[in-house]
Amino acid sequence: MENSNINSEEEKWWGDKHLELINGFWFMPFFIPGVHRVLAEFNPRPSDVILSSFPKTGTTWLKSLLYSIINRSSLDSLVNNNPHNLVPYLEVQVYGDHHQESSESSTHLSSEDTTRLFSTHIPYQLLGKTLESSGCRVVYVARNPKDTLNSLWHFVNKWKMGEEAPWELEDAVEKFLRGTVPYGPYYEHVFGYRMASLKNPSKFFFITYEELKDDTKSHLKRLAEFLGCPFAEEDDKEVEEIVKCCSIEVLKNHEVNKSEDCLDWFPTPYNSFFRQAKVGDHTNYFSDEAIKRIDAFTEEKFHKSGFVYGI
Ligand code: A3P
């Protein structure tokens, strides 16, 4: 029958690109088999650490920080590896169609007593049961909606997917508020993990990009405590060294991160993960009208529910 394969839970977002809906969240078709496999097969160990985030909220930074906290004295790894190859995405490098069997990404095979560190963009609403079934620790990084969207808009325009027309900013704002961006809606994504952290703070650590920017050192120590590997007073130099080695100024200058080559699993260059890293950078691009629209939406979605964040 003609049209019998049309999926009604499918929407266009950028150019001719589609997203598909799973339980209220939008996914790029390319990642869906991996997402399903994570939900069906991933059995976290109590000792696992999962970094969860909405895209463009500081994932790369957190990967380098968490990796350094867990693998003390391994700062050289950051010189030679992009953070995405040190901390694999569950739905891509571990369970995705293009999973890698390299030593870094096959950490899921490692022995029971090593701390495995994974990342994911899968929302709490889908992954929460799996995460809570095991007692593993989850770190969630959130970023204010305008800088998140600004970062996403720049990032998408760097993808090398053929002859795409640029993603216009007005369209990006529209889609972001509608929720039809990869892993969207943003507001529900953040809210899901925030509620989990309020309910279960010993297992879910919720931090914002802005807090981390404001005082990286103190939050790094808090993260280490949460992960059960606190720094002692006399480790202060080591803490400062990690902060420096994970700063954008240092990371973006490593050859591996300057590379125009694309990731093995996605057509975006390594250097596209390192841009301005500024709080409030959206003001350089967004119109007053767009800012007002997003702020009104944020007030409705976050503030009215008691989460005063993002404006
Ligand atoms: P901007 O586009 O605003 O510059 P993600 O890692 O989730 O994809 O997020 C990317 C954003 O984090 C980009 O923001 C990028 O510049 C910023 N970023 C990358 N590395 C960082 C670091 N070491 N410290 C702070 N921000 C970083």
Image (tube, grey):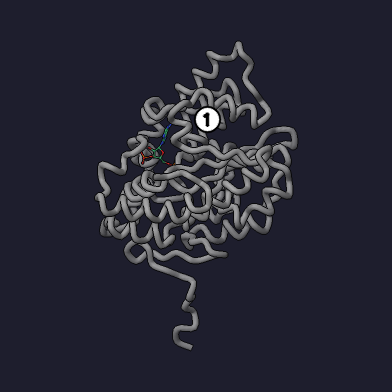
Residue hosting label 1? 65
Q: Badge 1 local density, few (<14 within 10 Å), some, or many (20+)?
A: many
- Labels in figure, total: 1
Seen at 64% across and 23% down, the residue is: 230
Height in image: 86 above or below 306?
above
Q: Position of residue 165 (x, y in %)?
A: 26, 59
Seen at 48% across and 76% down, the residue is: 8
Q: Position of residue 52 (x, y in %)?
A: 56, 45
> Does the numbered disc 1 mark a residue whose Cβ is under 8 Å from ligand 1?
no
Is 75 on the left or on the right of 278, as rendered? right
Closer-to-camera residue (103/221): 221
Q: Secondary structure at mark 1?
A: helix
Q: Is residue 214 visible?
A: yes
Which kind of residue does numbered mark 1 sit on? Leu
Seen at 25% across and 42% down, the residue is: 284
Closer-to-camera residue (118/276): 276
Seen at 43% across and 27% down, the residue is: 247
| Image quadrant in which you'd find residue 129 | bottom right
Q: Position of residue 88 (x, y in %)?
A: 55, 42
Height in image: 1 above or below 305?
below
Closer-to-camera residue (250/79): 250
Is 202 on the left or on the right of 148, as rendered? right
Q: Is residue 79 visible?
A: no
Q: Residue pushed farthest top?
A: 234
Is 73 on the left or on the right of 173, as rendered? right
Which quadrant does ligand 1 occupy? top left
Q: Quadrant of the C terminus?
A: top left
Is 119 on the left or on the right of 129, as rendered? left
Q: Position of residue 163 (x, y in %)?
A: 27, 59
